[in-house]
Image (cartoon, rainbow, N blue to C red):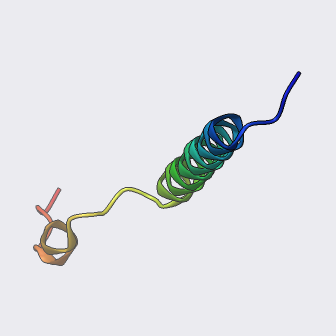
Amino acid sequence: MFITPQSVQAETAYRQERTKREFGRATARRERREQAAKPEPRHVRRSLRPTHAA
């Protein structure tokens, strides 16, 4: 197999694209994990309202 400038360019472009795709997946995965770790926001006003006398 001969190494031509075009084949080197193609290989470099392929590697860069693969690296970019892998980096994007890792970032998205980390963000999803962080979102799952955060509790749901609570309504503060509801806890400040007076309760009904039973």
Residue in the picture at 13% in, 73% down: 45
In the picture as drawn, the residue positioned furthest to the top comes out as 1
* Picture quarter with the N terminus: top right
Which of the two residues, 19 or 13, is positioned nearer the viewer here? 13
The percent position of residue 47, horizontal first and vertical second, equals: 22, 71
Q: Identify which residue, 24 or 43, lies in the foreground.
A: 24
Figure disc tally: 0
Closer to the camera, 16 or 31? 16
Vertical comparison of 6 with 48: above or below: above
Question: Does 45 appear above or below 24?
Answer: below
| Residue 29 in picture, x, y percent from top left | 58, 46
Q: Position of residue 36 (x, y in %)?
A: 52, 50
Taking the spot 69% from the left edge, 38% from the top edge, the residue there is 11
Going 68% across and 44% down the picture, which residue do you hit?
A: 5
Quadrant showing the C terminus: bottom left
Q: Of 41 and 49, which appears nearest the observer?
A: 41
Q: Residue furthest bottom?
A: 48
Would residue 8 appear left or right of 37 to someone viewing this image? right
